[in-house]
Amino acid sequence: MKFLLKAIRERKRELKKLREQEEEERKKELGIEEEKIAAERRREYIEKVKQTRYYETDRIRTFHVKFFIGTFVILLFRFSLEFSYIH
């Protein structure tokens, strides 16, 4: 009888250790996945900051202003031509 109880207790301990090991492995896997997600978020954030800095440089700002003005002038020219054909 003592041998049977001892064997049952030992089996329970083994099962508990196995459950704990499986839980640790699951936590490690989740931790790795979370680290990958966090790294991807950091990479995206850095890329966004780089892009924002690029568009804030004077050269790009000047380009966009000139492009906008050029587009505006072309539109005005088109409207003036259409208006001259109508009248």
Image (cartoon, rainbow, N blue to C red):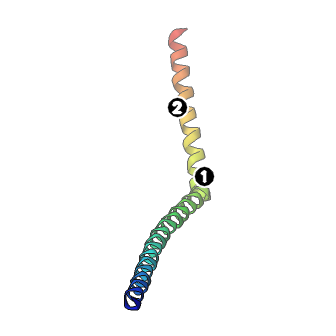
The N terminus is located in which quarter? bottom left
Which of 6/37 is in front? 6
Q: Which residue is mark 2?
A: 74
Do the residues under discs 1 and 2 have CB atoms within 8 angstroms?
no
Seen at 41% across and 87% down, the residue is 10
Q: Position of residue 14 (x, y in %)?
A: 40, 84
Q: Which residue is mark 1?
A: 61
Q: How many numbered callouts?
A: 2
Question: Which residue ends up furthest to the bottom in the rendered image?
Answer: 3
Q: Is residue 2 above or below residue 59?
A: below
Find numbered disc 1 in the image and state the secondary structure of the residue it sits on. helix
Which of 34/65 is in front? 34
Front tag of 1 and 2:
1
Question: Which residue ends up furthest to the front in the rendered image?
Answer: 1
Could you tell me the amino acid type at mark 1? Arg
Which of 22/51 is in front? 22
Seen at 56% across and 21% down, the residue is 80
Seen at 40% across and 79% down, the residue is 15
Find numbered disc 2 in the image and state the secondary structure of the residue it sits on. helix
Could you tell me the amino acid type at mark 2? Ile
